[in-house]
Amino acid sequence: MELQFYTPQNDTLKKYMEGYYFFTENETEEPLHYWTFPNNYCIVSINQNSRTLQTTQKISIFPSSEKNISANLVFRYIAPIEIYYEKMVNEITIYFKPLGLLHFADDKQPLFLENGMEYNPFPDFKREMQKIFDLPTRQQQIENLEKYWLCKLLVKDLHLMNQIILDVEHDLKIEDIAEKHQVSRQHINKMFLKNIGKSPSEYRKIFRFRNSVSRKKESKSLTELSYDTLFYDQSHFNKDFKELTTVSPKAFFKNVDIEKGNLWLFI
């Protein structure tokens, strides 16, 4: 299946969104079945005329005779998730950068309460998504999708959290980060859970994993790759990879098309 991942056309949205893709309803297509692997994005999926069943490690989507708009938010998974579509449905999935979704959220309502929870952030959200699904061309859908999110933008001062994220990505120890910013380790952990929905250690592990995938082509061997991407040694590299993908690095790179940022393994 060919999937086009769109980068936002609007420069302001590029600060907060990595991109988005569309699925289109198709009665004749076979079921779609794949594994998706951990990342640090906040993922909002919006579906038209469907029903969703979700467990810890599997999301199943089915066409529904009931006319509806449903959406869910996934912000934390540290093992592969199995995705199954009985038939293709109309869907828009948006990948928000770390902290990105916070700029479209009211501070009065905690954002990261339950992974996979129903997502309905604004009174007009479902109505406007329905209008976007009903537009006749992809370009019109893109323009109206971006226009909608831009009108909901609430620019916030998240400078401290951004700096702490950079420190984690540069592999500073949590105690050193705490000392640098004059806060406690416990406070940093609370900041991550509140603003990203996962702990600093989970964020770091996934960041290393994704960084190793993006840099695979530049490395001559898996050993070189492990050191280039801030793993302590080859054993640490193998251990984290197995936890996040359930397979060894060698098996992962053999079976998954790393040219595609979505990192899907079709079943």
Image (cartoon, rainbow, N blue to C red):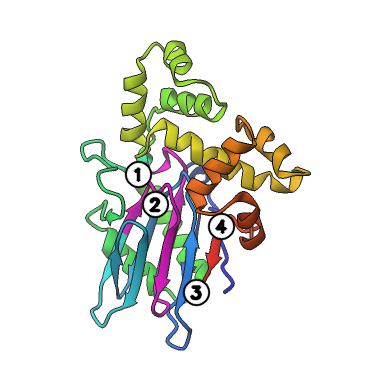
Residue that extends furthest to the front in the rendered view of this protein? 235
- Identified by mark 1, the residue type is Phe
Q: Earlier in the sequence, mark 3 or mark 2?
A: 3
Q: Nearer the viewer, residue 16 or 161?
A: 161
Give the foreground label among 4 and 3: 4
Q: Earlier in the sequence, mark 4 or mark 3?
A: 3
Whether the residues at callouts 1 and 2 have beta carbons within 8 Å, the answer is: yes
- For the question of whether residue 18 can be seen, the reply is no
Q: Quadrant of residue 7?
A: bottom right
Name the residue carrying label 3: 137
Which numbered disc covers residue 263?
Answer: 4
- Identified by mark 3, the residue type is Thr
Which numbered disc covers residue 57?
Answer: none
Q: Nearer the viewer, residue 3 or 52?
A: 52
Name the residue carrying label 1: 104
Q: Position of residue 166 (x, y in %)?
A: 52, 27
Which numbered disc covers residue 149?
Answer: 2
Label 3, label 2: how far apart the Cα atoms are: 19 Å
